[in-house]
Amino acid sequence: MQLQLLVLLSAICLNEVGAQDGGFREFFANSRARTIKDGSRNVRRSMTGGRISSMGGGQSSQTMGGHRNMGDQISMGGRSSKRMGRDKEGGGPVPTGSEGPGAPQVAPVPRPTVLPITPSPTNRPSVGPAPEPTPQPNTDPTPEPTPVQTTAVPTSTPAVVPTGTNPPTPFPTHKARVHNVLQWLVDQGIAKQTDFADANTHQFQAARWIADEDAAALAIPATIGEPDAYHFIERYVMALLFFSTKGKAWSYNFRFFSPESVCKWNVDITLPDSRKIQIGVVCDGEDGRIVSLNIPQNNLVGTLMTELGLLSNLDFLALNHNVLGGTIPKELGDLTKLSYMALHYNELKGKLPTWIENFESLRVLGLGDNRLSGSIPTEWSSLAKVRTLGLDNNMLTGNLTPLAGYSALERAYLEENKFTQDLSAIDWSQMQILEELDLSSNQIGGTLPTELLNLPNLRVLDLGSNLIGGVLKDFSFNGPSSLKYFGVHGNLIGGTIPTTIDYLNNLTHLDLSENAFTKFIPEELGRLTNLEYFFIADNDKLTPQIIPPFIGTLTNLRDLSLKGTNRVASIAPDLFFQTQQVNSPGT
């Protein structure tokens, strides 16, 4: 199951450089558990039969309804469903692409066996000459190192067993080499002397592995300018990543600590569409430098280490769906070549970094489902190439002004924060290629501008659970509408429902529930023949009338909620005869 989830997550997370224009086919794919209030009943919804991936809990579920069907983006799945129009949960597992005839077979990579590290002396190791420890009588089968008065590098420890190989003969202790590695890392500015305060620091463990346990036994470069120096640094950084995120508990070790180049520390995976990708560490084909670090859903526990900023050629960083806490270190601002940064579904806290403005090539930014706070930095207004932005489910405040000029923006997931914004104050005309906008569960006010609904490529608009008032204006567009999901549930919108709503002829999901609409439910809704989900519950100012006869013409309808809308009289016997796919009308 874990491997199947990794294949699925990779399929929707790593769709690398695959778009026709050579850019990313960004993340947030398929759909995620979404919620709308409708009384006290629950349902998960996913637009056009999309899939919900429960990446956090190790399970997946197929759902009905909803609005996240995002092609090839990283799934945001794993959150419990919000309340919607009915108690149905939808059923069945999500196909992972690794089941059934012809499914790709990917063998799990065993975890590395890391034997216990010999306890170090309590005094701090020196980067100067290390004296030999005092010999001890051999009175115990496992001799312990003798503490010395001067600072000394700890004695030999058992070697890490490379994955997929027989346990090697432990290397003899080379105290001079351990000292030289420590000294070189300090001299070159790769580490600080305080990083090696004792043998229990992650930095010391990584350096000692490089010096004394790594079967590759890389030569220590004379200077940082040597061609092999960068490979030495990368190997140290990757070893440090393992130690600093409790690598022994990783779900897969991706061949970490094998004697091969770090460029081989990955696994090949075949996606459901037959494409082959590599998960783990990936290098470019020219000078063998790391360009991609993609380790999602792998039980990385710890913090984002500052040394990641040393991977200066990194283009793709995906550590989402792990247990990484703390703040986002400023050293990551040195990764100026990044075009893809996915850190969502972790436990990161603090403010949104202003230095992200340095990422001039950034196309995908995923920081959702963390504990981030504060406002969107004004410096972010320079991120003109961002196509997919995910800041959802944090504690963010303020307005959306820095995003107003994002002319390349296609998908924006900003829901479940505390943003305050008058939608009419944004120039939506700059976002002509915007396809999906989710601002639900914020504190958005003002009225719904016609310019937003007029965007020619907009398919998903979720403004539910906000403070939007006024009335819905006529849906008169310059051209055909692309909108498939339209949700304004849980707002303060009044007035009548425009009869021109039939302009939204591609709608599959319409949610007008929990507002203050008056008068009648327009018959023109019967022309929305693609509707699968129609919710208008809890609008108690509507004029009492029978269930609209046009409901019987919506032959694709699967979910309907009319409760709390002053419906009267009995249900006509043949009303739902034509709508045989309606599961259970909520009246």
Image (cartoon, rainbow, N blue to C red):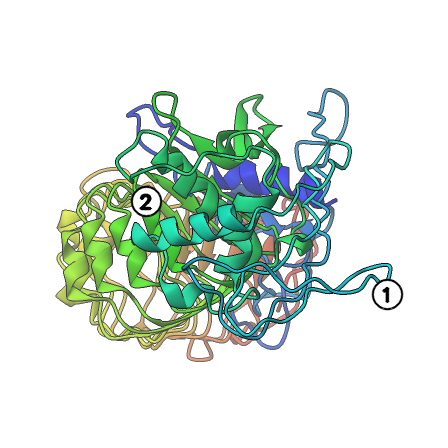
Query: Quick check: 426 left or right of 190?
Result: left
Residue 469 in which image quadrant: bottom left
Within-10-Å neighbours for mark 2: few <14, some 14–19, many 20+? many
Q: CA distance from mark 2 to mark 1?
A: 73 Å
> Could you tell me residue 510's position as x and y percent?
45, 56
At x 37%, y 74%, the residue is 491
Looking at the rendered structure, the kind of residue marked 2 is Glu
> Could you tell me residue 137's position as x and y percent?
80, 64
Circles 2 and 1: CB atoms closer than 8 Å: no
Kind of element beneath mark 1:
loop
Q: Is residue 211 above or below residue 78?
A: above
Q: Who comes first in sequence, dot 2 or dot 1?
A: 1
Query: Quick check: 524 left or right of 156?
Result: left
Looking at the rendered image, the quarter that the C terminus falls into is bottom right
Q: Is residue 186 above or below residue 266?
A: below
Looking at the rendered structure, the kind of residue marked 1 is Thr
Kind of element beneath mark 2:
loop
**Disc 2 vs disc 1: which is toward the camera?**
1
> Could you tell me residue 101's position as x and y percent?
77, 22
Q: Is residue 366 visible?
A: no
Looking at the rendered image, the quarter that the N terminus falls into is top right
Q: Which residue is mark 2?
A: 435
- Decide which of 575, 487 is in the foreground and name it: 487
Q: Which residue is mark 1?
A: 139
